Image (cartoon, rainbow, N blue to C red):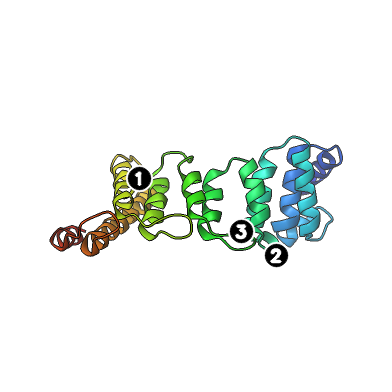
Amino acid sequence: YVVKKVYAFLKQAVEKGHPNALLIYGQLLITGSEGHVNNLGESKDAAKGIAMIEKSYKLGNKDALRELGMVYKNGTGGIAKNYSKALAYLTEAQEVAYVAAIYMEGGYGVEQNLKKALEYHLKSPARFSTFYSIGELYSKGGPGLERNYAEAIRYFDKSIEFIDKSTNQGSIRKIEVNYKYKMQLRKAEMLFSGGFGIEGNPAKAFEMAFEL
């Protein structure tokens, strides 16, 4: 009875044009289980869900922009991935980390552009993951960005410094430590081979690798 009441209130809020209710309703139509959707007296309908989320945004709900972008980025609910649409929504929503990720990967209507990816990563909040991603960009290079081991190491070091100062515990801390080991190994590989802005130093590379 209580569950049915909740869904009834949600439907009433949608009928009155409440932006948050429209967003939730749209999400359920796209990704909800059959049980959730049946409680609304509906069937799963991604196109209708998208339309409701778009209406939510037009009524002033900025969270709907991010949701639309992620739906097209991830291909949620069977919707075809479309990075071009995702990019438009996520850029407007100022979700810079996701915009950077799209430019890093490319495809689905968007050309890979590492220069653009770097530009958006540099706008992202200072996190170990941000510095790690920038280091990875420089370590590999690609369309729009030359490989630069010196910059890669500099950003890996910034990420490691961030991790060393972290006070996180449990599973989050394990993730941080795993990334730290991964970056130390990447630094060792670059030092061993040299080039792209650094001198090779196999002895230091071996020393760094055996410290892991």
Mark 2 lies on residue: 78
Residue 61 position within the rendered picture, expressed as x and y whole percent measured from the top left = 71, 37
- When the figure is inspected, residue 201 is found, relative to residue 2, above or below; the finding is below
Q: Which amino acid does label 3 sit on?
A: Val
Distance from the alpha carbon under mark 3 to that under mark 2 = 20 Å
Residue shown at 71% from the left, 62% from the top: 79
Where residue 12 sits in the image (x, y, percent)? 84, 41
**Above or below, 70 relative to 122:** below
Residue carrying label 1: 169
- SS assignment at label 1: loop
Mark 1 or mark 3: which comes first in sequence? 3
Q: Quadrant of residue 46?
A: bottom right
Q: What element carries label 2?
A: helix
Image quarter where the C terminus lies is bottom left
Q: What residue type is labelled 1?
A: Gln
Q: Position of residue 199 (x, y in %)?
A: 20, 57
The label nearer to you, 1 versus 3, is 3
